[in-house]
Image: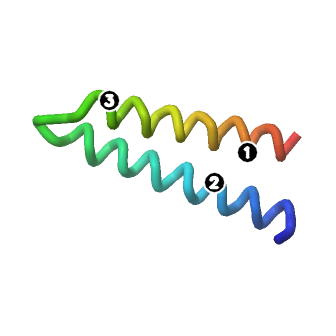
């Protein structure tokens, strides 16, 4: 796997997490811990993308 394809896959995962977070937050009974966990994963992906892009 090339570096650019790896970064591309990370970006796709990041976007999927964003969509999932949005959907979960639209529910009236949002699980705060689940949202927090997903946001942490999303941040880790973003940091990984930035690190690899530098």
Badge 1: residue crowd in 10 Å (few <14, some 14–19, many ≥20): some
- Left/right placement of residue 29 relative to residue 23 reads left
> Which circle, 1 or 3, is nearer the viewer?
3
What mark, if any, has residue 34 been given in the picture?
Answer: none
> Which circle, 3 or 2, is nearer the viewer?
3
Q: Secondary structure at mark 3?
A: helix
Residue 34 in picture, x, y percent from top left: 33, 36
Gap in angstroms between the C-alphas marked 3 and 2: 23 Å
Question: Which residue is the extreme one toward the left?
Answer: 28
Which is more N-terminal, label 2 or label 1?
A: 2
Circle 2 is placed at which residue position? 11
Q: Secondary structure at mark 2?
A: helix
Residue that appears at 85% across and 61% down: 3
Q: Quadrant of residue 21?
A: top left
Gap in angstroms between the C-alphas marked 1 and 3: 24 Å
**Where is the N terminus found, in terms of image quarters?**
bottom right
Q: Secondary structure at mark 1?
A: helix
Circle 3 is placed at which residue position? 33
Q: Quadrant of residue 26?
A: top left
Residue 29 in picture, x, y percent from top left: 12, 35
**Where is the C terminus found, in terms of image quarters?**
top right
User: Cβ–Cβ below 8 Å for labels 1 and 2?
Assistant: yes
Gap in angstroms between the C-alphas marked 1 and 2: 7 Å
Circle 1 is placed at which residue position? 49
């Amino acid at each position: 796997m090339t570096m650019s394809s790896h970064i591309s896959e990370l970006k796709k995962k990041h976007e999927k997490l964003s969509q999932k977070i949005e959907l979960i937050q639209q529910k009236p009974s949002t699980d705060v811990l689940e949202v927090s966990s997903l946001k942490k994963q999303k941040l880790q992906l973003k940091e990984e993308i930035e690190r690899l892009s530098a």
